[in-house]
Amino acid sequence: GQNIDQPTEMTATEGAIVQINCTYQTSGFNGLFWYQQHAGEAPTFLSYNVLDGLEEKGRFSSFLSRSKGYSYLLLKELQMKDSASYLCAVRASLNDYKLSFGAGTTVTVRA
Amino acid sequence: NAGVTQTPKFRILKIGQSMTLQCAQDMNHNYMYWYRQDPGMGLKLIYYSVGAGITDKGEVPNGYNVSRSTTEDFPLRLELAAPSQTSVYFCASSEERSSYEQYFGPGTRLTVT
């Protein structure tokens, strides 16, 4: 099976930076995804990494190290609307388009 | 372009009843998925489909059935509902095998009592 771990909860102050870590042990690897899910809503796509390194998209960045089975999502200049659950998901192989999801990290942004 | 739509939004079932959760997408995506999400848990794949007429089991298929007669529609059938099936159900679709983004519907919140 696939094992994807991320912290359950994190709290940060408005304007600050938060880093959400994700470690994975999977049968193979062909990409890591981050989704944002506000309470009571559907997940929405944030980022995708398939090669090592940092991908930056506005206030959000995502990093991948395939050798360490590790990724993080960095949220900068936190806003109240960033309070949500952040899901890490792994695609195990090129021929396997299914995603395996972690349990999600709930981020609470406080004023 | 409505994306992925799901009906109903909410439903309460009695134990032993059956129902069908509807899912449709208008993006001409070949790949479609059904997930369930329990409180504090990630998404668990129930069934998926790579195109009309082709379906396969995911991680947690027991108690569910699916069909895919058209590209657009991917209904999920619950037979003999049990309290363990109380969950939020999400349908999703993606474009091609190499696509990295899954588009999710708004979800159906199901309670079995």
Image (cartoon, coloured by chain):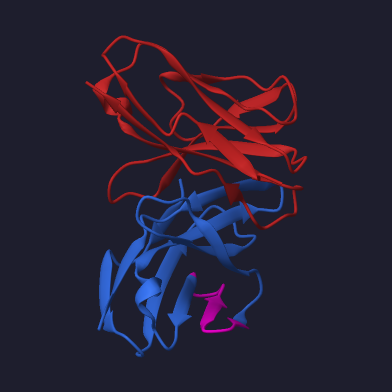
Chain colours: A blue, B red
In this rendering, the answer to whether B97 lies above or below A9 is above
In this rendering, the answer to whether B31 lies above or below A65 is above
Residue A25 in the image, given as x and y percentages of width and height = 46, 59
Residue A16 in the image, given as x and y percentages of width and height = 34, 90
Q: Residue furthest left?
A: B113
Image quarter in which the C terminus of chain A is found: bottom left
Residue B23 in the image, given as x and y percentages of width and height = 58, 31
Q: Residue at x 74, y 41 (%)?
A: B29
Count of picture labels: 0
Query: In the figure, is residue A25 to the left or right of B81?
Result: right
Question: A27 or B79, which is in the foreground?
Answer: B79
* Magenta stretch, residue numbers: A56-69
Q: Is residue B35 magenta?
A: no
Q: Can residue B78 be seen in this snapshot?
A: no
Question: B46 or B7, which is in the foreground?
Answer: B7
Q: Is residue A64 magenta?
A: yes
Residue A17 in the image, given as x and y percentages of width and height = 38, 88
Q: Residue at x 27, y 27 (%)?
A: B84
Q: Can residue A79 be seen in this snapshot?
A: yes
Q: Residue at x 66, y 44 (%)?
A: B2
Quarter of image, res B60: top left
Question: B43 or B112, which is in the foreground?
Answer: B112
Q: Residue at x 69, y 39 (%)?
A: B31
Query: In the figure, is residue A41 to the left or right of B2?
Result: left
Image quarter in which the N terminus of chain A is found: top left
